[in-house]
Amino acid sequence: MAHTHSLEIRVRYHETDQMGRFYNARVLEWFEAGRTELLRDRGMSYAQIEQRGILLPMTESHVLFQNPARYDDALRLNTAVTFAGKARLRFDVTIEHLDAIPVARGHTIHAIVDPAGKPVRPPTWVRQLIEPAGDGN
Amino acid sequence: MAHTHSLEIRVRYHETDQMGRFYNARVLEWFEAGRTELLRDRGMSYAQIEQRGILLPMTESHVLFQNPARYDDALRLNTAVTFAGKARLRFDVTIEHLDAIPVARGHTIHAIVDPAGKPVRPPTWVRQLIEPAGDGN
Amino acid sequence: MAHTHSLEIRVRYHETDQMGRFYNARVLEWFEAGRTELLRDRGMSYAQIEQRGILLPMTESHVLFQNPARYDDALRLNTAVTFAGKARLRFDVTIEHLDAIPVARGHTIHAIVDPAGKPVRPPTWVRQLIEPAGDGN
Amino acid sequence: MAHTHSLEIRVRYHETDQMGRFYNARVLEWFEAGRTELLRDRGMSYAQIEQRGILLPMTESHVLFQNPARYDDALRLNTAVTFAGKARLRFDVTIEHLDAIPVARGHTIHAIVDPAGKPVRPPTWVRQLIEPAGDGN
């Protein structure tokens, strides 16, 4: 994925469970951090996107858990974004140890809606954020 | 405490950490469940209170951790509420195993504010909720 | 699903986010509550299963988010379990408002492993828990 | 506090609630990040401390909530550690916006125990970690 954004995180104690690994639901919280930092890196934070009246509620998530990660392990999140139809975004994420051993991978789908929750055609500034000029050429 | 409300909960797997006990911050989430069910039992849910324009943001919390509790342990929360000055509420909570071994105890203080965050004198319906007629006699 | 287990939960304040709905990752925590109570209802708690040396780490999750649910909404979780191959379990879950409006649906896959993380053939007592005698006839 | 450790974090979406601010229990999770990074900065991670057989379960927490912080706000955590008696540690934490507006402050007390949960006199390597040579002179 050419335009993948990378983010390094650490497994926090409160993210572990009694199996001694990160708890499964934490992956969806990490996916959020990946989306947030990808968008900021593209030039507009998700906070700014919401302030402009565009919300991106999740409509679907899929996660494969590949290998454990333990407390304080440093992990790399790689996040990419594409359009999934006209009014939906898809984020693909891989999480790996710094030595590239895979931890989890998955994707999430997000509706593009206004503050009332109504799906909207993404405005130009959203399109440019997701598909920067020259992307894919 | 005469007007204590009791609620039974179970420690969930996602609330444990690698020490094999519940994680410390979960207690503040359990305190919330205790407040919510106490108020519902008094006759008005916190959801309804917010809809009437009164919010109760936390301004202080204090917790003593007394004994561990493990995954799937059934625990009893005992919650009581009083006024702490004119525009603040105080909730006192004890958490114990069903055989009365103490797990944690503490209290939280909450401002009484309007949706803009401004402290307000509690209206009569709030006073009656917190200090039901005949209370303390 | 003939042997579906039902559990009623409430959306807690700490499970909401600034969109005013439950946060997406909470669904995986609710799925856990559904699995736990289904197994207890079958006659053995997941805590007891772990004590007998069988762990069920999640290997895959899929969730469709259908409709919002808000703070203090009462929701019904319906959970069913089947074998997915020889050493894996599959839990199917639907979450709905009490008036049957769907909130989310999905499934999770779990490996059946020993405490060292090695996949094991499910012992008879596990098979009987998942496929009670007479099931499916 | 001379030996305060600073850490910058951001409020994540999953840490907000429907009031549009971070949820109160998140502060205890942030306190954990502060402790972890302070100890790593001193030369030994908390993961290593646990591997050496010393655990630090929380026995008390106190938090004052001073001002709201919203999604994606960057916050500074300042953490300091001292002994609180012979077998206990105390961490003092302040959280503030980058322009120094205070968000929350508090402290936590931790027992120093072995893996069986028995309080132990802190070994020399723990004392040196908490009170580096020359500290306080």
Image (cartoon, coloured by chain):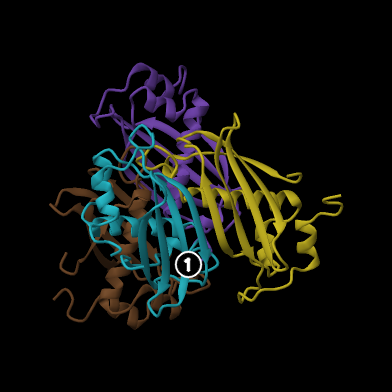
Chain colours: A purple, B cyan, C brown, D yellow
Nearest the camera: C110 or A70?
A70
Counting from the top left corner in percent of width and height, residue C45 is at: 34, 75
Q: Is residue B90 left or right of residue D76?
A: left
Residue at 35 percent across and 71 percent down: it is C86
Q: Is residue B41 left or right of residue A52?
A: left
Judge whether residue A1 can be spotted in this image: no
Q: Is residue B4 left or right of residue A72?
A: left
Q: Which residue is mark 1?
A: B104
Against B71, is B123 above or below?
Answer: above
Q: Chain of mark 1?
A: B
Q: Amino acid at mark 1?
A: Ala
Against D14, is C11 above or below?
Answer: below
For disc 1, the neighbor class at 10 Å (few under 14, some 14 to 19, many from 20) is many
Residue at 26 percent across and 53 percent down: it is B129
Counting from the top left corner in percent of width and height, residue D25 is at: 46, 51
Counting from the top left corner in percent of width and height, residue C87 is at: 38, 70
How many numbered marks have been drawn onto this rendered protein structure?
Answer: 1
Residue at 37 percent across and 28 percent down: it is A50
Nearest the camera: B122 or D98?
B122
Residue at 33 percent across and 36 percent down: it is B114
Nearest the camera: C79 or D43?
D43
Counting from the top left corner in percent of width and height, residue D30 is at: 55, 48
Kindly state the secondary structure of the residue where label 1 is placed: strand
Against B76, is D27 above or below?
Answer: above
Judge whether residue D124 can be spotted in this image: yes
Tell me where residue D77 sits by quadrant: top right
Q: Residue lying farthest front?
A: B137
Nearest the camera: A92 or D38?
D38
